[in-house]
Image (cartoon, helix red, strand yellow):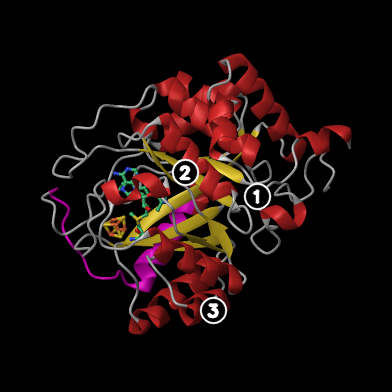
Amino acid sequence: MQIVSAFPVRHDWSRSEVEALLALPLPDLLHRAASAHRLHFDPTEVQVSTLLSVKTGGCPEDCSYCPQAARYHTGVEATKLMETEDVVAKARQAKAAGASRFCMGAAWRSPKDRDIPKVAAMIREVKALGLETCATLGMLSGSQATALKDAGLDYYNHNLDTDPEFYGDIIHTRDMQDRFDTLAHVRDAGLKTCCGGIVGMGESRRQRAGLLMTLANLPSHPDSVPINRLVAVEGTPLADTKALDPFEFVRTIATARIMMPRSMVRLSAGRAEMSDELQALCFCAGANSIFYGEKLLTTGNPDTERDLALFDRLGLRPMHVDAAEAPAAEASGGCGGHCACANG
Ligand code: SAM
Ligand code: DTB
Ligand code: SF4
């Protein structure tokens, strides 16, 4: 119990406190992160999600990092919303390959009300396969969030993406408050939240601290926290951004783990460009979730053989999640009672 109180679930982080964590000597930071990780999770288990772009490209937004924004010339071809049976076939393949969660992404600013029944049908059928379901469709109204929940959606992914102070350098077509509003609709509908951001967009360490602070100070910690490393895509305004120091990435993961000890911290976009050694350090720093499968939405991801071989070399295994019973991070500790934490 004494150790538990050393890692309380806090929502009152200051920027300077987070900066101090990010600046710790790396061995100290890793030790603190690994200790927090063990309190709530089995550190040898990694949750595995597969992504599918159910509606690609042609997006009216101007997110500077994104290959799917219509205004940038990235070679991504715009498509219509996929047919449900094609989505279900992909979900079946993902399950057979070992995924426990299936995330459907659409390049929308926000769905139109007439899109919701089509997405709801996909969710219903994917859920019936025994997979956890996640969707990322842009901004949602309260009634849209409720309709998705009623269809069987478990998680909604909506990222803050960066520090509120840096946001205006990256996106101009909607603001941070729009994101907070969507997250409130998602929580109010009883959905679990998947919310994180991107690092390596040219932000400072102070601004990485600002992203983590804003995530951890949300009314409840996101159940999943995807930490993406920018995939610099030709044709986007961020194409020539200098790659982030890998150790700075590890520091970001470790700090997220300390601040949001009961959340799944996902090593997200950018893994295809990471060495096995860097990924191993991230798992030791408390990352316990990945996107699994050859493709993210439009860019590459390590192939499944490479990931399974890496798990094998590191003594890691996919986390088995019962889609009907997965707990909310703050309700039960994120561990589902499978570890030795105080919530079990
Ligand atoms: N259109 C919806 C939205 O913006 O919420 C859903 C899909 S959008 C592609 C989901 C997330 O993917 C973004 O919020 C961003 O964090 C991430 N993303 C997009 N392009 C990326 C890139 N080039 N590198 C890293 N992450 C990226
Ligand atoms: C998230 O945080 N990362 C994923 C998922 N949520 C939807 C998307 C990464 C996209 C990387 C660029 C692409 O493949 O288009
Ligand atoms: Fe559109 Fe989402 Fe890409 Fe922004 S991140 S351009 S909203 S698909």
Could you tell whether 255 is left or right of 240 in the image? right
Magenta stretch contains residue 106: no
Could you tell whether 202 is left or right of 99 in the image? left
Mark 2 vs 3, N-terminal side: 3
Q: Which image quadrant is residue 77 in?
A: bottom left
Image position of 4 with respect to 49: above or below: above
Residue 109 point in image, percent of width and height? 30, 67
Residue at 57 percent of width and 37 percent of height: 256
> Is residue 276 in view from this perspective?
no
The residues bearing labels 2 and 3 have C-alpha atoms spaced at a distance of 28 Å
Q: Which mark is residue 11?
A: 1
Q: What residue type is labelled 1?
A: His
Residue 42 point in image, percent of width and height? 72, 35
Q: What element carries label 3?
A: helix
Q: Is mark 2 on a helix, strand or loop?
A: helix
Could you tell whether 70 is left or right of 298 in the image? left
Magenta stretch contains residue 92: yes
Q: Name the residue under label 2.
A: 211
Part of the protein shown in magenta: 74-94
The residues bearing labels 1 and 2 have C-alpha atoms spaced at a distance of 13 Å
For the residue pair 161 and 318, the one nearer the viewer reads as 161
Mark 1 vs 2, N-terminal side: 1
Q: Residue 158 carries which label?
A: none
Residue at 12 percent of width and 49 percent of height: 75
Q: Mark 3 points at which residue?
A: 146
Mark 1 vs 3, N-terminal side: 1
Image position of 116 with respect to 63: above or below: below
Label 2: few (<14), some or many (≥20) within 10 Å?
many
Q: Which amino acid does label 3 sit on?
A: Thr
